[in-house]
Each structure stands twice: as structure tokens, then as C-alpha cells.
Amino acid sequence: MSARSGLTMTRTLAVVLVAGAVLGSCNQPNSTSANSGATSNGAAPAAKVTLLETGSTLLYPLFNMWVAGYQKTNPGVQITAQSTGSGTGISQAISGIAQIGSSDAYMSDAQMRSQAGMLNIPLAISSQMVNYNLPGLGSNQHLKLSGPVLAGIYNGTVKTWDDRAIATINPGIRLPHNQIIPVHRTDGSGDTFIFTQFLSFSTPAWSNSIGYGTTVSWPAVQGGIGAEGNAGMVNAAKGTPYSIAYIGISFRNATDSARLGVAQLENRDGSFVLPKPDTVGAAVNEMAAKTPPDERISLIFAPGAQSYPIVNYEYAIVKQQQPNPQTATALKDFLTWAISPTGGSADRYLSAVGFVPLPDTIRQSSAKQIATIASGNVAQAQPSGTAPSGTAPSATAPSGTAQSGTAQSGTAPSATAPSGTAPSGTAQSGTAQSGTARHTAFAP
């Protein structure tokens, strides 16, 4: 699967130097240009080490900063970052095209069983906004929305902004009698994964019909449109009055510039909260102790009065077995730097995109996973909690909710989408993560 060229952002930051320090097994000076035919002592120069990262559009802004910062002290490693969507990141990490598949979603149990030796390594913690283009609503007014209301908007049963379901939880706000235009992702998306998890965990009707995944069969909603990538979601919402969209927190500056509103979402305890470092941190504090050794877990709809309900680990999906020692070492060193409080997890990086650092216990678990990356034959660990052969495992759902992942097909309505977007209900590309084969880690 490939991302559409028109909306795929690619940035390569590279400094080409001799990677003698990385190789470790040669003593040639590392100051020779890569274009020279030999080193100063006549020996052929060592090949540089290259790493390719593809995947999450939510993580892409941070990866751009990481690459720029990392190369300052590690000029012998060339890193290319590509914004392609989490589905592509996962599939390209599995195939070996990319050394790092960045993803807002962890791999399912079914994927882990069929693709032995894959690691899901949390690098940081992010969140997701629900944004809306509602003319006339002041920027200091934040609509209150719940999982059931959002499920109703995206399945077409909540049709207008002054619907009773919205008006009841927003007393005192004058809501227009205009049709709601839901915007959804058309590419394989970790943002879709965590948004539809929120709908599934909070709304049994959604769980029983649509489920969650990096792609789902969106119900056909009149006027609904699709967009690719977080940038596409921002542009679609900006250009469509009375629209609503789910957008990663790293695009907060873009949504503010587009004058899109940010909703307060109802959490599991019934409180309405905004996505802020303290509310994201509150959710993580509730879930960190439940994180299993393989770190595949949903942080969505966590308990706690102050917990923001759409929070997730940002994952590096990598192969435990790399093709050679040089690549394994370079990959381990970069990922170790990325989770370090003095490296990629320093505040100057994370606060710029609205992320929060991993708790110490999770950072230590990620470090243990990183340490297992090697070249040659390595022991393949069974996914944590994997059910016996032939048994489909399921996650623990919130009390009173079901987690059926049965997809519901829909027909494409006629709608004119903004440039770069597709009508709602169109077929979606990406590595699908069906809600029927889930991780066995705890869901709240």
C-alpha cells in the first residue's frame, strides 16, 4: 500500500560521513567524504548507515525535529522520515521496507502471530482533538461532546448541530440548525484507530456494528467527506463550515490557525475535559501500571475524573531481527535517544507538539524492548497474553460495553469533497486492524 503522493509529506535530513564509529570494527578515520574513493590510508570508505521511518502523520512533526536534533551528534547515520499514515508504517515495518514504522496503533494479536519478531515500542504519549468548524461560536467556548454523541454524528443519527443530544449537554450555547458534516480519514490511520476505539469503548451500539481499526467501513452519512492525513483533515474541516473532524494534537497550531474549535470530551467518569498535559497525564497515570511487557495496550477511555479520554502511546514498530549489526546498532541507539529525558523526550521536543513523556516505568519497558534488537537469529517471543492456537483473543472492554469488530458496509453518497478529500463511504487503503482480533492487554 502506498500513500497518495499529493498528501504525503517527505523530508530527508542527512549528513553523509563515514560511519566508522558506528561500525566499530574498522579503524579508518571517519572524516572522509562519502564521495571520495578511499580513506587517507588508501582503504575503501565504510558504508554509511541509513534508517527509514514511515508512518503516523501525528508523529511526523516530532520525528522531523528528532532527526534534526539527532544528526547534530550522530552525523554518520542518515535518517529519512516520511508521513504516510500508521497503516503504511506498520506494513512497511513488517515487510522490511522501513526500519521504523511509526504508529498511533499497536499491532493486533493476529498480526503478531503471523509476523513473529515484531516489536511495538512506545516512544511518547499523544492525544487527539475533536475539532469543529462552527461559525459564530466564540473561540473561548468549547462545545461539550460525548462518545455516544460522536457515534451518532458519524453514523448519521445525530444530523444537525442543534440536535437535542448536543443541546442537552451544552446549555446556554446557541446552536445553529445546520447539517453536521463529519470528516474521516481515508488512509490507514492510527488516528482512526484511537478515535473508533473511543467510540467503541463508550458506545455499545458502535462497538456492535462498526468496531475499531486503522480502517473501518464508515456508515454513509449525507454530506460526509474523507481526507488523507492529519493535514488533510485540517484542510477539509477549515474549508467546510459546520464540519467536525478528529485531528492529532501535534496539529494544534494548524487547527488554531484554521480557527477550528476544540471540544471538551466526556470521560469515563462523566467529566468533560480538554486535551491538556495534565489531563493526558492523568489518563496515563491510571493506565501505566496495566501496561504489559510487550506494551500493546489501549489508553483510551481511562478512568479518573481528570483523565482525557483519547490518549495513546506513539509506537515505533520495528523488527527485532535486523539485517546486519550496523543497522541494529544504529536503530537501537536512535530509539534509546528518542525515549531519553535528555534526548528526544526532552521538553523542547515534546511540548512543541503537545506530547508528554513516558512515565519512568514505561520508559524502562521500552528500553528493555529496544535492547533485544539484534542481527541474525533472535529468539521470537510470544505476544503477551496470546490465546492458545485457534482461539481469538479479545480485549477487556469498559463495563457494560461490547467489542464486536464486525464491519458494516456502506455505499458512497454523492458529495463534493474539498481538494484532496474523498466522499464518505469510499473504499480505504491501509493495513486494516479489525476489531475482531485484538491485543490481550487491558482496555479500561
Image: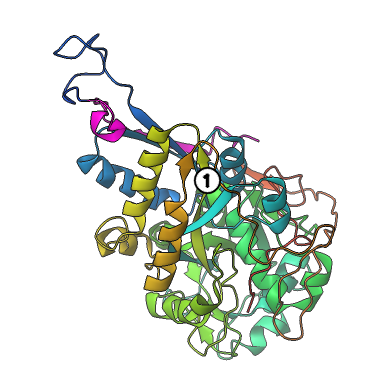
Residue 68 shown left or right of residue 322 in the figure? left
Q: Of helix, strand and loop, which one carries label 1?
A: loop
Tell me where residue 113 appears, x and y as whole percent: 71, 51
Tell me where residue 70 appears, x and y as whole percent: 27, 45
Residue 182 shown left or right of residue 253 in the figure? right
Say if 208 sits above or below 113 in the image: below
Magenta-colored stretch includes residue 15: yes
* Nearer to us in this view, 390 or 127: 390
Q: Which residue is drawn at 78% across and 67% down?
A: 156
The amino acid type of the residue labelled 1 equals: Gln
Q: Would you say the magenta stretch is mainly helix, strand or loop?
A: loop
Specify the segment rendered in magenta: 1-26
User: Is residue 338 visible to us here?
Assistant: yes
Q: Which residue is drawn at 26% across and 12% down?
A: 44
Classify mark 1: residues with Cα within 10 Å, few (<14), some (14-19) or many (20+).
Answer: many
Residue 80 shown left or right of residue 87 in the figure? left
Q: In which quarter of the image is the C terminus?
A: bottom right
Q: In which quarter of the image is residue 26?
A: top left
Say if 267 sits above or below 315 in the image: below
Say if 244 sits above or below 86 in the image: below
Tell me where residue 382 appears, x and y as whole percent: 65, 57
User: Mark 1 — residue?
Assistant: 320
Q: In which quarter of the image is residue 161?
A: bottom right
Q: Which residue is drawn at 77% across and 60% down?
A: 221
